[in-house]
Amino acid sequence: MMRKAVLTATVGAAALAFGVAACSSSSSPSSSSSGSSNNAGAKPKVGIILPETATSARWEGADRPALKAECDKKNLECDIQNAQGSDQQEKTIADTMLKTEHVQVLILCSIDPTTGQAVTSEAKSLGVKVIDYDRLVTGSSPDYYISFDNVAVGKAQGTALAAAVQSMAIKSPDVAILDGAPTDNNATLFNQGYMSVIQPLIDAKTWKKSAEQAIANWDNTTAGTTFTSMYNADHNINVVMVANDGMANAVIADLKNLGINGKVAVSGQDATAGGLQHILDGDQSFTIYKPASQEAVPAVDLAAELAAGTTPTETFANVTDPTNQQAIKSLLATPITITKANIDQPIKENYTPYKDVCTAAYVAKCTAAGITAQ
């Protein structure tokens, strides 16, 4: 059950915790998925647009099945599509959902603010309610926003990275920082969170900041080449604050080439199979687990209420849009830090499939870590 509380805060302070609930981990190779076709004409219609598949496995592997399961539970006709990183495809999908399918509610995880603003504007012109999913489309004035407390995500990253530096007995920490996409409001919030931990260490000269760079589109390849340039300029880098598992994977590949993997503290986020494998190897210090059901369930439940024309029963936080200073009704869940000590949690809760983590090369390490087949 979701714990409700009244909160009025900026994005940097708001938090509303949901209880942990497992979500399906099966993924679909298709770019679209809808609910049961039985009596489809009688069901409320909801459009759901996910952003891409290139930088994180979560969208298709975790969010899609969690969203579909809740759509089926709520007897909604949900069209779930993925824009595959293309702003034009996002607009095309939205146009079809709004003008051809006549959805009553649009759940949107947009690629960037410009695209999201255009889609939201079109939806509003047609009287369709918009729920921003995971990412707030700044400046678009959505009706609602469902996400994690993304400043808390970043703070958890910074806290876990500082703990890893201590446990690894790294002397003279020299940190390189790889932020997420500058167009993604979540990346800005993550940065606020982890820098609230890291910057005081830098100011106190306990840590040295070597370099920092935002990575356009969260592109993993760019993250790898950027880190290579950073390391070439400073061979003393021994800590890497990297915003998610996909980019961390590129950094770790470079560290392996240098022969220093396992000696450098590396952060992550999203509890991907690759991220968990790197933790088992000792090459990644931690990841951040954000159960998809904690976004998918409240988003779909809210969509069902809106489609039925009923007043939402949730108690919302007010998150301030940094672009237009508008208060957005929001529900924010609390992230979970995953280290080797609790590495089995996202697997037990069917977020990251056992078969994807505990492949033949990792069966022994999984067993040693207490991970069992589900």
Image: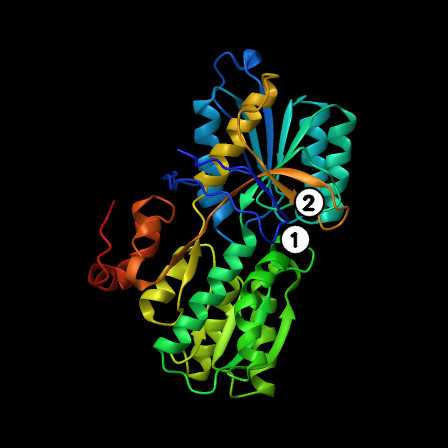
- Would you say residue 54 is visible in this rendering? no
**Gap between marks 1 and 2, in whole Å?**
7 Å
Residue in the foreground of this view, choosing between 269 and 167: 167
Q: Quadrant location of residue 339?
A: bottom left
Quadrant (top left/top right/bottom left/bottom right) for the C terminus: top left
What is the crowding at mark 1: few (fewer than 14 residues within 10 Å), some, or many (at least 20)? many
* 193 in relation to 264, above or below: above
User: What residue does disc 1 label?
Assistant: 185
Residue 130 in the image, given as x and y percentages of width and height: 66, 32
Secondary structure under badge 1? helix
User: What residue does disc 2 label?
Assistant: 137
The residue positioned 55% from the left and 28% from the top of the image is 302
Quadrant (top left/top right/bottom left/bottom right) for the N terminus: top left
The residue positioned 61% from the left and 74% from the top of the image is 226
* 192 in relation to 6, above or below: below
Q: Is residue 245 left or right of residue 84?
A: left
Secondary structure under badge 2? loop
The residue positioned 36% from the left and 65% from the top of the image is 279
Give the amino acid type for the residue marked by disc 1 in the picture. Answer: Asn
- Would you say residue 363 is visible in this rendering? yes
